[in-house]
Image (cartoon, rainbow, N blue to C red):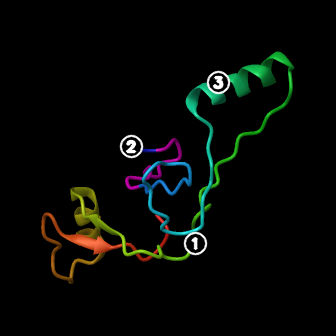
Amino acid sequence: MIKDDGRKKARCVSNGAKNMHGSVTLAETYASSLEQNESRVFWAATALKNWKTISADAANAFAKADAPVAPLYVRIDKQYREWYSAKYPDRPKLKHGAIMRVKKAL
């Protein structure tokens, strides 16, 4: 998926929410977000009150987060392999099904 400004949307997300049953804490960084119904109620209420509301995207909310405490690996998908080959044409090609360790926030 592509955002309105041309940037690609995130393709890999680890849910570190503490209320997720059976979840593993990978790091202490967490940003909550509204569910779709909650978001609709919020925007409807602000429109009903005729309030000015500003929407913002915290694009780098996790940019400074440490690496996960427990080792976390992701399978490299086709899009990443294609990007990697275009970015580093002199390096060996990544194989289908390869994995890599997550060293930064996702």
Residue 12 % position (x, y): 38, 56
* The quarter of the displayed image where residue 92 is located: bottom left
User: How far apart are the alpha carbons under marks 1 and 3?
Assistant: 30 Å
Asked whether, in this view, residue 51 is left or right of residue 60, the answer is right
Q: Is residue 70 above or below residue 31?
A: below
| Local crowd size for mark 3, using a 10 Å CA cut-off: few (<14), some (14–19), many (≥20) | few
Q: Are marks 2 and 1 in contact (CB under 8 Å)?
A: no
Q: Secondary structure at mark 1?
A: loop
Q: Is residue 2 above or below residue 99?
A: above
- Judging by the rendered image, the residue that carries numbered circle 3 is 40
Q: Residue at x 86, y 20 (%)?
A: 50
Q: Are marks 3 and 2 in contact (CB under 8 Å)?
A: no
- Residues 68 and 106: in front is 68
Q: Amino acid at mark 3?
A: Arg
Q: Is residue 24 above or below residue 48?
A: below
Q: Amino acid at mark 2?
A: Met
Residue 23 % position (x, y): 44, 56
- Judging by the rendered image, the residue that carries numbered circle 1 is 65
- Residues 94 and 31: in front is 31
- Residues 69 and 102: in front is 69
Q: Residue at x 26, y 57 (%)?
A: 79
Q: If you read the primary sequence from the N terminus, does the residue marked by circle 3 or circle 2 appear first?
A: 2
User: How far apart are the alpha carbons under marks 2 and 1?
Assistant: 25 Å
Q: Secondary structure at mark 3?
A: helix
Q: If you read the primary sequence from the N terminus, does the residue marked by circle 2 or circle 1 appear first?
A: 2
> Between tags 3 and 2, which lies in front?
3
**Magenta stretch bounds:** 3-12
Q: If you read the primary sequence from the N terminus, does the residue marked by circle 1 or circle 3 appear first?
A: 3
Q: Amino acid at mark 1?
A: Ala
Check residue 1 in the rendering and tell me which mark sits there, or answer none.
Answer: 2
Asked whether, in this view, residue 78 is left or right of residue 11, the answer is left
* The quarter of the displayed image where residue 93 is located: bottom left
